[in-house]
Image (cartoon, grey):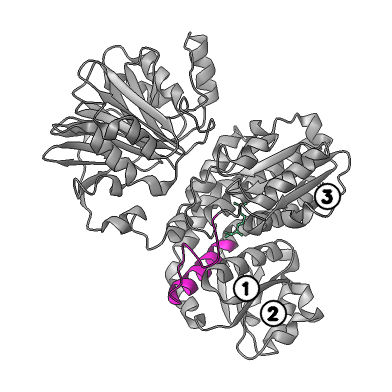
Amino acid sequence: MCGIVGYIGTKQAAPIILDGLSKLEYRGYDSAGMAIFNGKTIDFKKATGRLKVLENLTKGGTETPGTSGIGHTRWATHGAPSDVNAHPHFNEQGTIAVVHNGIIENYLQLRKFLKEKGYNFQSETDTEVLAHLLDYYYKGNPMEAIFKMLRRVQGSYALGIMFAEHPDVIFAVRKDSPLIVGQNEDGCFIASDVPAILKYTRKVYYVDNQEIVKLHADHMHFYNIDEEEIEKESVFIDWDANAAEKAGYEHFMLKEMYEQPKTITDTLNPRIKNGNIEIEELNMTMEQLQNVKKMHIVACGSAYHAGVSGKYVIEKLARVPVEVDLASEFRYRDPILEEGAMVVVISQSGETADTLAALREAKKRGFQVLGIVNVVGSSIAREADNVLYTWAGPEIAVATTKAYSAQLVALYLLAMKLAQAKGTIDAARMHQLLGCLERLPHQVERLLNTKEQIQKFANRYLAAKDIFFIGRGIDYAISLEGSLKLKEISYIHSEAYAAGELKHGTISLIEEGTLVAAVATQPELYKKTISNMVEVKARGAFVLAVTCEDNKEIEKAADYVIYIPETDPLFANSLAIIPLQLFGYYIAVGRGCDVDKPRNLAKSVTVE
Ligand code: AGP
């Protein structure tokens, strides 16, 4: 996600901002910029590409003198990476500057409102609406303009704001996206994360939701959304710099697992309005959706596993047949795409060679392609006809977790939208499904908080040679991903099987003590999966079951049970995968593996 750094004090601001942004590079970005008050006006520099480009452009900040400023590294969400889309963004007079991390969910409505008021926009970003909205409300008092702006804005935001007419202060605002402020003898600081200012101070204040901070050179004031001044407790950071990049987590993978509730929220909320699903990015009318006769989902690895899960959800809700292909197979099997087919490719990086080739193969045959992609402006995002972004933010760990979870909820939205168009679900069912989606983030958080229990169980299997995952229907899709998570970071051999397949060969591999993880989240399949559990148990297996809280029957067939909270069976994948991610993670940690950078693997497989 984006990085924000701000400074106001007695030192030159630009070098401090550039240094702070360099400590946030791990968050992933595609462009950078900064605004500095030079004594008269707000000077700014922006550049696409690495931070080095901005550093060179400003000669390490010496070309932009001034003792107050705000800087930004941009992870694109709305608008491809470009100089004009880079932050900071300004009002038309260039007297108000804003940097932003997050997603303004109602930016289209605000953009329309401001255009009707005569405002002109330079960029494609959601952020620019904030600069013009502040201008619209600014009558000389920055705090008044900020409070009024906040009452109009929906979404997640961490903001740094400057007003040329008030050079003795800078402002920080936070809702959902992380933001801290700090102070030392030379000034006050704003930052998205601790690493950016650890060099200058270990005494920080975590800005809470809907708090506004007014930073002067030698002191700060904190306010709540009701415009009341509040007191804040400071926190002393005793992390070392390396730990700080992971926000105190031992690995990026664990940090990203813990970001899943926000990832799910950020992917769902902008597409659910007034109890309805609106996916503008589909660019398909209800009639076009009604005419979809078959869907082809094409992807690799975990994205493929999300697609397998999506198949079950889409077929169940929309009654549209779905074929899921590995991209490396699809591209060479001369696929049969019939009229009325909808092709969907899924990719976190948007650069996977096989998936890109599959997209081109489908387009060569005259079919429109929808991309479900995480990296804005990536090759697949640029070449797809339409893009449904997963807005998981940059994923650093090679083993995907939060992007995979975002892919799942993107597919749920697609399934529900298609079902609505097909008339295969009524308003009551839509309402019930939306209620389940709304509860997912909190339920994921609850499961993440069972990590000690999972770690204790995982430590019993550090020396395992083979671990099998079995399930039926969506549980098979969950097994595929649970098995991949384990093997790609712990190097333990693992396989996932449709539970009904065991007796066709694999069961011969089961020995005394072999761990078999049975996923049973689909009530109409409980009995069938339990019978498979009994089969492997009879041959010596130790059976770990992942099931729903209401499934007490399973306890007679399992040796260890992990329960997931109640949700619609179609969304159970989003919950059951959490303990399996943690299981794979703690086995890898226990085995001393390089969790974030497993051997032989790359975060993006850009070669065949
Ligand atoms: C997932 O943990 C793996 N790193 C890998 O399977 C990955 O999902 C696959 O390479 C697809 O990558 P993409 O989503 O960036 O296309």
Query: Residue 83 placed where, x, y %?
Result: 46, 27
Which tag is nearer the camera, tag 1 or tag 3?
Answer: 3
Query: Residue 280 placed where, x, y %?
Result: 65, 30
Q: Is residue 365 above or below residue 324?
A: above
Query: Residue 540 placed where, x, y %?
Result: 65, 90
On whether ligand 1 comes within 8 Å of the CB at mark 2, the answer is no
Query: Residue 585 placed where, x, y %?
Result: 49, 68
Instruction: Count neighbours of disc 1 (C-alpha within 10 A) and say few if under 14, some if 14 to 19, many if 20 or more.
Output: few
Which tag is nearer the camera, tag 2 or tag 1?
Answer: 2
Query: Amino acid type of disc 2?
Result: Met
Left-right relation of 354 to 192 = right
The residues tagged by marks 1 and 3 sit, at their Cα atoms, a distance apart of 33 Å
Which tag is nearer the camera, tag 2 or tag 3?
Answer: 3
Instruction: Count neighbours of disc 2 (C-alpha within 10 A) and say few if under 14, some if 14 to 19, many if 20 or more.
Output: many
Q: Which mark is residue 484?
A: none
- Work out whether mark 2 precedes mark 3 in sequence or the reverse, and give the earlier one: 3
Q: Which mark is residue 321?
A: 3
The residues tagged by marks 2 and 3 sit, at their Cα atoms, a distance apart of 30 Å
> In this figure, which residue is indicated by the disc labeled 1?
552
Viewer-proximal residue, 594 or 555?
594
> In this figure, which residue is indicated by the disc labeled 2?
533
* Residue 594, magenta (yes or no): yes
Segment colored magenta: 577-603
Query: Amino acid type of disc 3?
Result: Pro
The residues tagged by marks 2 and 1 sit, at their Cα atoms, a distance apart of 14 Å
Viewer-proximal residue, 507 or 29?
29
Indicate which quadrant contains ligand 1: bottom right
* Residue 505, magenta (yes or no): no
